[in-house]
Amino acid sequence: MMVADPVTPIGLLIGTDRLTRTSLAPHPHIYPATGAPNATVALAGADEVGMAVSAAREAQREWITLGVGQRRDKLIDLADVVREHLGELAELNTLDYGVPISYAGNAVMLDQFLRHFAGYVDKPHGSSTPVSGSSDVNLIEREPFGAVGVIAPWNGSLVVAASCVAPALAAGNAVVFKPSELAPLAALRFGELCLEAGLPPGLVNILPAAAEGGDALVRHAGIAKIHFTGGGHTARAILRAAADNLTPVVTELGGKSANIIFDDADLDIAAVRSAHQGPLMQSGQSCACASRILVHEAVYEAFTERFIDVVESARIGDPLDPATVFGPVISAAALDRIVGVVGEAVDSGSGDLLAGGRRLTEDSLAAGYYLEPTVLGNVDNTSPLAQTETFGPVVSLIPFADDDGAVRIANDTPYGLNAFVHTRDLTRAHTVARRLQSGSVWINQGSRISPQGPYGGYKQSGSGRTGGLEGLREFQQVKNIRIGIG
Ligand code: NAD
């Protein structure tokens, strides 16, 4: 399936212009479900970044002079337009990276976050406090940064549009949004919808780019802040590049989340949730994926049996079929890498292969990048399999003996993004949650990323928060104004 004419590249969006020719060669976008070309996408380099930053800075000056009521209404108008196009955005999201369309929730998030952050625009953003020994008026105000750069991973262009672009605009900024070249389609449509909703041209610019364009964005002196979502390796390169201009950088990074199954949990429900939060969730290609399942030794066998039943009965197939639960991984290279990680774990005795581990070669799936959902048992938590993000449909089962052991294993990785706890005992759930080094703890449920809930990591899972007031604050800077009286 081609989403566009294969010869003419899909253009970048800068202001109202679509740039189909840039300083760099266009990127052939591949649909992971078929391994076939899907579209050709223009890529931004330094020149296009410069144009987009100029457009954003000009639009931001217009945006900030609008009254707060007008800015609030414009964001609600945008949410309305997004809501009218939810089906189209969900389909483009699927074509972007092969995620089953049953994950249409990514498009719904955009609608929800825009409405949530629109609500902040006309609410108090500052305060006034007395100062000792003076009758001065002491104001603490919150201002936008100006033009900010938002960089998204291939598995999250709509999620990042929701969790970062929406608060950036609500705080009064303009955005240069850089989706991955591997998944630019839904983001580009979102940029068009911003114009259709009547946002000032240039307020949201969409620049699909690879590392070169991303680096140019980070280094541009006109960018006042970078919000980066992606992997730790890239975050290190970005932090180094941002050092030249001392540009502040927020990072939202990967995870190796623990999902703790206590011996009093409802095992049938825990097995279903763990499968959908683990290997089945976007084929394990989600930062929120619970890739380590810690199971109390008393229920280890009973849970494992139920869990594998659920995993092996997942419907695998065409991502555009609403009944499909499990789709391909992003690329042939990713598939080879993931198969290698599993082979290495088995060969080194780090775990026992209980399910999956092979590329799917049935006729309808052979050309796509499909891998069996994969489960390893009795995994050594110190092994590379348990310590590094696999970013594929692979989970480790790790037995534990008591609550202290569960907490120790859960915290024993460099990451700290999410954790999950399954128990009927709420005292135990809460006590354990407080001991977990993790930005989110979800108890008796799967991941629940909401506009109201701050989301982000501890340790090497990142420094920032999206969602709620904390998410808005990432896009505001603080000014103190003192007025002498008398
Ligand atoms: P990645 O780090 O390879 O790329 C992320 C983005 O950075 C892409 O747009 C890429 O083009 C860009 N980039 C690459 N090099 C750059 C450079 N030198 N300068 C500027 N930009 C550059 O990550 P990915 O493979 O696209 O996504 C997967 C990763 O993202 C996983 O680690 C996953 O856990 C993480 N992720 C985190 C969250 C979160 O909210 N914490 C959400 C989704 C994904």
Image: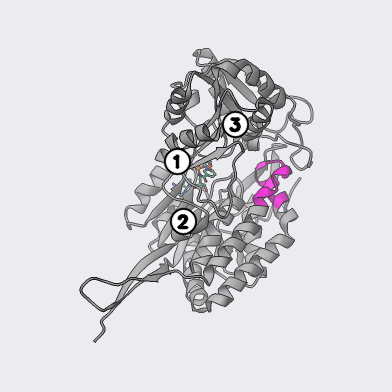
Say whether residue 297 is left or right of residue 225.
Answer: right
Q: Nearer the viewer's eye, disc 1 or disc 3?
A: 3
Tell me which amino acid carries mark 3: Arg
In the picture shown, does residue 439 fall above or below 348? below
Name which of mark 2 and mark 1 comes first in the sequence. 1
Q: Residues within 10 Å of mark 2 (few under 14, many from 20)?
A: some
Magenta segment range? 90-107
> For mark 1, what is the residue?
461
Ligand 1 has an atom within 8 Å of the beta carbon of the residue at disc 1 = yes
* Residue 206: % across, % down: 57, 59
Q: Distance of mark 1 from mark 3, alpha carbons? A: 29 Å
Tell me which amino acid carries mark 1: Ser
Q: Residue furthest bottom?
A: 486
* Residue 349: % across, % down: 51, 12
Q: Residues within 10 Å of mark 3 (few under 14, many from 20)?
A: some
Residue 210 or 358: which is nearer the viewer?
358
Give the residue displayed 58% in from the left and 66% down from the top: 118
Residue 312, quarter of picture: top right
> For mark 3, what is the residue?
424
